[in-house]
Image (cartoon, rainbow, N blue to C red):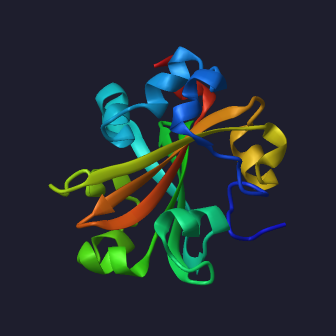
């Protein structure tokens, strides 16, 4: 078992956004996958100040091979990996994994390495030159989730997710977000 992620046992299979017509994404999941703005802001618009972040992992480590490739980073290089669970009250809504190379942290004046319990979206969407470079889509089956996560949030159905490359001052970061059943009702 890989310790590269506290969320899943093995890296999900990601699909190019061009294949969306073949993926049969339900409308309620597509609404979140194709959200152009901040997921955090959309959650706050609905739930207000009840949205909170639980940090599951925040450490320097090697990324999965496909993550390194998307970031154009050597596979053995250490990046800041942050995995979180977003809640409203005690309802889990989104699991997220962010990979941030050192050069991106430097270009963002260290703001990304000291997020604490602040949502990443709150910070990156405040950068005037934020670019969205690519989007990939996945659907993860229950058995691929780490047991600790399964027990914590009772995952009992496949989850849709998206993986987005953003760039701040032309330096990339990779954000993977997985939408839990409760969020699909909004």
Name the foreground residue: 76 vs 9: 76
Q: Position of residue 63 (x, y in %)?
A: 61, 71
Q: How many marks can you see?
A: 0
Residue 53 position, x and y percent, is: 45, 51
Q: Residue at x 45, y 23 (%)?
A: 31
Q: Nearer the viewer, residue 6 or 137?
A: 137
Look at 34% across and 69% down and name the residue there.
112
Position of residue 162 in the picture relative to residue 37 (left or right):
right
Residue projecting furthest to the bottom: 77
Q: Relative to residue 134, is residue 110 drawn left or right?
A: left
In this picture, residue 140 sits left or right of residue 20: right
Quarter of the figure with residue 25: top right
Place of residue 125 in the rendered image (x, y in percent of width and height, measured from the top left): 25, 50
Whether 41 is drawn above or below 103: the answer is: above
**34 lies above or below 52:** above
Residue for point 78% across, 37% down: 141
Q: Residue furthest left?
A: 128
Res. 64 visible in picture: no
Image position of 114 with respect to 132: above or below: below
The image quadrant of residue 45 is: top left
> Is residue 71 shown to the viewer in this render?
yes
Looking at the image, residue 40 lies above or below residue 175? above
* Residue 48, x across and y down, in percent: 31, 32
Quadrant of the drawing holding the N terminus: bottom right
Of residues 54 and 155, the one nearer the viewer is 155
Q: Quadrant of the C terminus?
A: top left
């Amino acid at each position: 078992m890989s310790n590269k992620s506290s969320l899943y046992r093995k890296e999900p299979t990601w699909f190019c956004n061009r294949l969306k017509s073949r993926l049969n994404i339900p409308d309620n999941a597509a609404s979140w996958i194709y959200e152009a703005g901040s997921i955090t802001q959309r959650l706050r618009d609905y739930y207000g100040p009840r949205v909170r972040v639980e940090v599951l992992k925040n450490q320097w480590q090697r990324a999965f091979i496909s993550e390194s490739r998307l970031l154009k980073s050597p596979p053995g290089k250490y990046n800041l990996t942050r995995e979180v669970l977003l809640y409203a009250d005690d309802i889990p809504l989104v699991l997220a994994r962010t990979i941030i190379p050192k050069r991106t942290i430097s270009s963002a004046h260290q703001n990304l390495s000291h997020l604490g319990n602040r949502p990443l979206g709150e910070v990156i969407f405040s950068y005037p030159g934020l670019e969205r470079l690519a989007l990939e889509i996945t659907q993860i089956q229950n058995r691929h989730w780490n047991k600790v996560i399964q027990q914590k949030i009772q995952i009992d159905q496949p989850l849709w997710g998206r993986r987005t490359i953003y760039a701040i001052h032309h330096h990339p970061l990779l954000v993977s977000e997985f939408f839990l059943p409760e969020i699909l009702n909004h």
